[in-house]
Amino acid sequence: MTTLIVVAGLAIYVLLYMTYGKKLERDVIKASDENETPANRLFDGVDYVPAKPPVLFGHHFASIAGAAPIVGPVVAMAWGWVPGLLWVWFGNIFIGAVHDYLSLMASVRYDGRSVQFVASDVITKRTGKLFYWLVFFLLILVIAAFAAVVGKTFVGDPKVPTAFFLMVLSALILGVLMYRVKMNFTPATIIGIIMLGASIYGGALWPVELGYSTWMIILFFYIIIAAAIPVDVLLQPRDYLNSWLLYFGLALGAVAAIFSFHGFTAPAFTSFAPIVTGGKPSPFWPVIPLVIACGSLSGFHSLVGSGTTSKQLEKESHGLPIGYGSMLTEGFLSTLVVASVAGFGLQLMQDAGESITVANWGSQYVKSMSATYPNAVMFSHSYAQMVATTWLGFIPISVVQVIAGMWVAAFAMTTLDTTNRLARYTISEIAMPLKEKGSGSYDFLTNPWVASMIPAAIGIYLAWSGNFAILWPSFGSANQLVASITLLTGAAWVSKRLKGKSTAVAICTIPAYLLWITVTAAIIWFSSVALPGTIKANPVTGVTVLVIEIAMLILNFIFMYDFLKYRKQPLEQEK
Amino acid sequence: MKSVFFTGKGGVGKSSLSAAAAWQLAEQGNRVLTTSFDPAHNLGDIFDEQLSHRITRYKKTSLYLQEIDLEKSAQEYLKSSVGILEEVYSYTRAFNMDKYFRILRYSPGVEEYAALVAMEHLFRRESENFDYIVIDTPPTGLTLRILALPKVTLAWLDRLIQIRLQILDKRYTIHNITGKHDGKETKLPYTEDEDTVMRKLREMVTRYETVQSFLQSPDNNIALVCNPDVLSLKESQRLVTGTKELELPLRTLFVNKVTSENADAADRVEKELLDEIPEVALKRVPMFRQDTPECYIMDTDLTGPLGFTTEKKA
Amino acid sequence: MTNIHGKGGKGFFRVFLEKALSFFSIIGSSHREKAAELTRFEAKELENLFVLLLMGSFTGIPAPPSFIAAELLPHLEHEIKVLNARAHAASDSMAEIIGLLDID
């Protein structure tokens, strides 16, 4: 069954890439190699430099891949394996990958400007400002959610923290080798990979058990420090090692899934509204986008794509494989996750003593999963089981567990510390109006330490409650809100600038409106049904999240108002 | 070769004294060049000659005269830097934008730089040819800025070199990693030898260090000329402070235009200044007529206080 | 197109080897880029700063004396390009930073 699903997923993606993807390219974007991309037209050897498609693909994919495509599907298993999988497949193909592709191409046609800029042009200037606030909230929630992921993973599988900190050490050493001693690249890489392997083995050998709160404190200081030191000390070499981990994990997982031939033990479908978040029955629609973000749809991707990728696109025809294709690849990754948990999750939980069965899966899954193998750990252990059933089973199972656990933890950690750096930047942008007022508040807010501490402190504080079932969807809500706004921006661009045929425009606007409605409904449901339960249990966390959700909802409505108002207005200047 | 800069407020008698000192040194058998950087250009009047930037011999003596036209120097320097900019931005000629580069004339530092360049050339070219170079300086503010220029420039150069080294280091790292796999077309220099900018920076450092060390050397003397009055005193104090900050050797103080009426004032001025620079060699110079021919000849010996030996050369 | 039957063209094995090598070299390239990405960004920022300092003397910012700039500028063509590129991007930098920093 694992094999079947994985192969089917691959086939569906490839098929629809060829048909639907190509249609997008041809009829909606009307991509043509005759149009010179900004990488060529504005070539400056600095930012605008055309890159070879496979290299750019690797870069873009590595930038968008991370921990979220793994954690999301694990939680979504509560609905049974079919609903989540359908969202991963068709949500991705018709909404998520479209979103990525549109934002990339819009950016390309706007000389490599960001999606935020495009929004200011096709909708209104206010939208641009709105982005900063949204991104700021998103960053705080990212820190909260991902710190919780890491914390739970560290507690749920004590081998992982050891491996992780050994990897940090390896990265520091690699940094010295590559950037100070300036050793030759290939030997340095080999040493790096060896150290990475050693960290993984080390993790398997020497697990470290600490409490969740202790990890939160450690994480807090780690984030602040890592965001302050020069990038080539830790960040750069660590990113580099991570990319090796990513490809290896993906390859191992794909091979294992295809050769595993294992049946699914989890139910295909439990109910429309099993217990997923806030201990409340969560309707599949509209909540699913909050749970599965990056595997199907993610607002971050539009910002990533319009940053560097659009400035390096050599030909317009490369946009489809890179923008649309890498999102599908991430979907494939999520497919692997579903396959492994569906195949091995039930057994794992039952062996751990949980009284979960196929029958009570809907109400029991989230509880059991959190109790035994929270989120990422559920994935890592299922994944390890899957590998063990194949000819790759010679690798010790504890090692495979560390590999998979590290995968999630390492990527979650990179997100954490770079998020902090980014938050500093957004704070300074948001605080800009204060500068003119002349008060010392601008200086205070933009002081590097203060600007670092604010998001870290809020985020970690939220994560402290450990209420993952609330934190994860709240991150999802912010992320998808950004996604719905960027998809609507893309749709506005298509209708205003490209002036395509009405069917072509509909391919973009219908998903865009649907998404907006879904996300708005999801946030409303989340704020009114799921959160109130939490407020009794963790008041500060609950209220903070509620305030953020309401603020985002207000911004959301302002955006929709502007969008509808300026929808029919022609653009002021022709590009 | 020894040098002396005659500094002080306008009108205190710098030009007269520098002319007189130069004459005395020449009489002792030395080859002496006296040059004026002062825009007021009194030197030519004193010697009753038409002077220019070309060094001319005074009658048949061992005294040589020169007047540096700072404005002309500045114009020439500007022409060459505008020329460089026009080369770099040659497309601006097509749009008649090049005339906007003329605004550079008002850039701060142009005059100072022109003076510094002239001074540097002078010392480099003429130190072999002369035993003494006597310099009549522009008014205090400009003089201080000129004298400060090597130090200021060296501070900036040091900072620029630091940044440049970091840039080269990072480029080297990138090259080491991406090497011949780098897709970028142009090759950027990443070692010090290959980097023209770095070489130029180092050259400039050498040049200014040379000037700086020369200005601070025992063969150089900053002589301060003041009059027995309050304004002159105030300005002289500024010069004292300035030369102290720049660590330049102010060795001689001439109190000029002393008469029986202002002798008390002269006492007070001397006392004030000696408080600040106790080791200075002090000399009172009585008022003398300046409107007669050969007014550069005076009785008061200036060479002794300047710290130069008075032995006659054969 | 390559002829896999070896008639008047390259043999199958040769073609396979070439393709495999180019595949690995692309992966290698991609990895190298990843390893150098942030350093490249830093280098650009420093180059920007360097030439900005020098240019400052022409625009009234406290800066090195303009003669230093006049002497160095002809050799700073690349840095001036960086300055211009950075100036364009300055108003729109959020996406670039997000792209560089590995946010999921």
Image (cartoon, coloured by chain):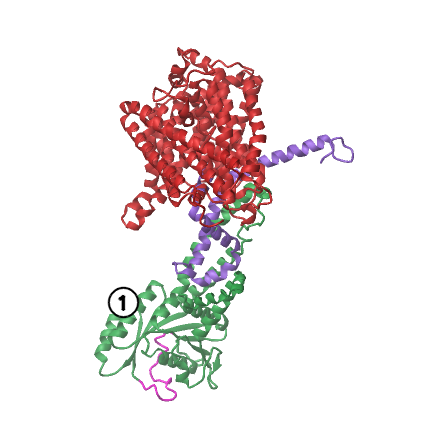
**Residue C95 placement (x, y as % from top left):** 45, 41
Residue A538 vs residue A218, the one in the foreground: A538
Q: Position of residue C68 (x, y in %)?
A: 46, 61
Q: Which residue is mark 1?
A: B276
Magenta-drawn segment: B288-307
Q: Nearer the viewer, residue A112 or B28?
A: A112
Q: Is residue B292 magenta?
A: yes
Identify the chain drawn in green: B
Image spot of residue A388 (x, y percent): 53, 17
Which image quadrant: the N terminus of chain A? Answer: top right
Q: Is residue A534 left or right of residue A413?
A: left
Q: Residue A522's image quarter? A: top left
Quarter of the figure with residue B248? bottom left
- Give the letter of the red chain: A
A314 shown above or below A361: below
Residue C64 visible in the shown view? no
Name chain C's colour.
purple
Look at label 1 and name its amino acid.
Glu
Q: Is residue A470 above or below residue A26?
A: above
Q: Is residue B292 above or below residue C98?
A: below
Query: What element does badge 1 sit on?
Result: helix
Query: Seen from this angle, which residue lies furthest bottom?
Result: B292
- In the drawing, does residue A467 fall left or right of residue A308? left
Secondary structure, magenta segment, majority class: loop
Q: Is residue A407 visible?
A: yes
- Viewer-nearest residue: B244 or B66: B66
Q: Does residue A266 belong to the magenta stretch?
A: no
Q: Chain of mark 1?
A: B
Q: Is residue A201 left or right of residue A33?
A: left
